[in-house]
Amino acid sequence: MDRVEAEAIYDAGREAVVEVLLRMDAQIQTLTERVARQDERLDQPPDPCTTRRQTLFSPSAGAASGRSGIGSMSDTPSLSSLATSTRASCSFLRR
């Protein structure tokens, strides 16, 4: 909002000013709550299930290890071993 808009609201009278202030306060409260939720998420340790999946299946994972492309099948863990290790590391989620 610029000065001209603010003066137009003021000139519209007391009710207009109160209405705009209440609407702005509601928006501020909503944004404050959203920031607080984001701060809480940032304070929590990373989810081991998500981090593990990103590491195992990230295209950059092969590049970081010096391999180009997908690599040989011996370098790739089997799906059953991935499922077992993921279930074991994420078992705390079922409580």
Image (cartoon, helix red, strand yellow):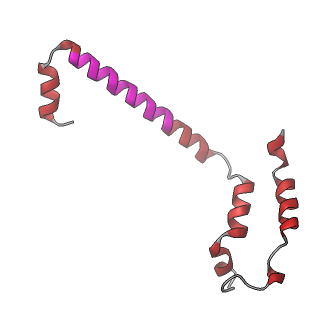
- State which quarter of the image contains the N terminus: top left
In front of the other: 40 or 85: 85
Give the image quarter of residue 12: top left
Q: Residue 75 placed where, x, y %?
A: 80, 81
In the image, farthest residue toward the top:
14
Give the image quarter of residue 66: bottom right
Say if the magenta span includes residue 13.
no
In front of the other: 3 or 23: 23
- State which quarter of the image contains the C terminus: top right
Using the image, determine if residue 85 lies above or below residue 68. above
Image side of residue 23 versus residue 14, left or right: right
Using the image, determine if residue 25 lies above or below residue 50. above
Q: Who's the residue at 43% across and 28% down the image?
A: 29
Using the image, determine if residue 33 lies above or below residue 60. above
Q: Is most of the magenta stretch helix, strand or loop?
A: helix
Q: Residue 53 placed where, x, y %?
A: 72, 62
Say if the magenta span includes residue 19.
yes
Image side of residue 39 versus residue 88, left or right: left
Q: What stretch is highlighted in magenta?
A: 16-34
Give the image quarter of residue 40: top right
Q: Who's the residue at 85% across and 54% down the image?
A: 87
Q: Residue 77 placed where, x, y %?
A: 83, 73
Q: Residue 64 placed where, x, y %?
A: 65, 79
